[in-house]
Amino acid sequence: MTAFTSFRARAMLALGLLLAAGAQAKLVEEQFDLPVKTRNAWGKAVEQPIRITVFTDDSRPGPHPILLLNHGRATEGDARAAMGRARFSEASRWFAERGFLVALPTRIGYGVSGGEDVEDSGSCHNRQYPPVYQAAADQSLQLLTALLARPDTLKDRTVLMGQSFGGATAVTLASLNPPGVVAAINVAGGGGGDPKTHPGEPCSSAQLARMFASYGKTARVPMLWLYTENDLFFGPRHPRDWVARFCDAGGSAEFVQFPPHGEDGHALFSRFPKVWQPVVADYLRRQGFDLQD
């Protein structure tokens, strides 16, 4: 065997081993139940376990930064009960491949967690928004405590994220400045929207604006807010007003409003991941995360 063919054979063997290692890398999914407690909008105490889904990529060694990802809220009770458990499989894989431990709570009143609807904010003309977002935030804070106790997580590199109701929950959490949180991402966050009965005009919108302003007074976590121009839940105008109120009150948020996508841009997070992923990746890199595509 010549020196050249020997080198080529060794190179081909090394390449084969690398490809085999890459092929073996996989998304690891686990589930566990977490006892949580909170209160509904009328002060009733509620305590029960909720289902937590966690994703990691086994090719990315820990400890991992945490990405805590909250789901939205369907307008109808049957749909909330039938949701199963929060997974956001494509988004979760994307974050896990970039080194995150992705944790998704299925909150009280939804899917496999079940229980009463602690996120019922009342009639459309008099919504009680802050208590129901606090109810969602309570569950996330208890989950975050459990995650930070794990040996495979970093204690000072947590990112909060959520879509729709979960996006507003991320803003609520940012206003509480949980320990170890370095960034938060709100995707189409808000409440009270219904594209069937009042498209683009959420219930009690003035109360939502006041809530976001109140969050800006205490939030010290840098945020990224993502919306679309054709969001049928909140329209193009209200999100711009909310982020302005939030920032004017002292919060820090970058705001991106994408052009129309699909028949309802509110579904951008799940239906058009290639649109938001570069924006989120750039934002996280600027927060100090070493993301590898």
Image: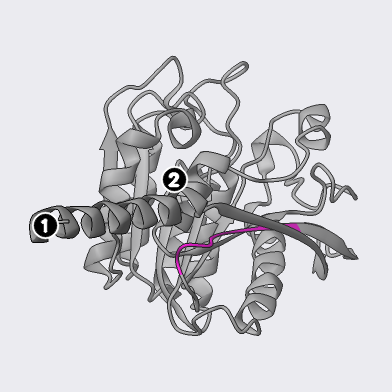
Where does residue 112 sit, x and y in percent of width and height? 84, 45
Asked which secondary structure carries label 2, the reply is: strand
| Residue 56: in magenta span | yes
Q: Position of residue 154 (x, y in %)?
A: 49, 81
Name which quarter of the figure residue 13 lies in.
Answer: bottom left
The residue lying toward the viewer, choosing from 165 and 154, is 154
The answer to whether the residues at label 2 and label 1 have Cβ atoms under 8 Å apart is: no
Question: What residue would you read off at disc 1?
Answer: 2
Q: Amino acid at mark 1?
A: Thr
Residue 156's place in the image compared with 174, above or below, is: below
Q: Residue at x 65, y 85 (%)?
A: 149
Majority secondary structure in the magenta region: strand
Write down the quadrant of residue 237 in the picture. top left
Residue at 77% from the left image edge and 45% from the top image edge: 120
Query: Is 17 in front, or is 179?
Result: 17
Residue at mark 2 to residue at mark 1: CA–CA distance: 59 Å
257 sits to left or right of 270: left
Q: Nearer the viewer, residue 80 or 217?
A: 80
Which disc number belongs to residue 187? Answer: 2
Q: Quadrant of the N terminus?
A: bottom left
The residue stretch that appears in magenta: 52-60
- Residue depicted at 65% across the width and 66% down the height: 140
Q: Amino acid at mark 2?
A: Val
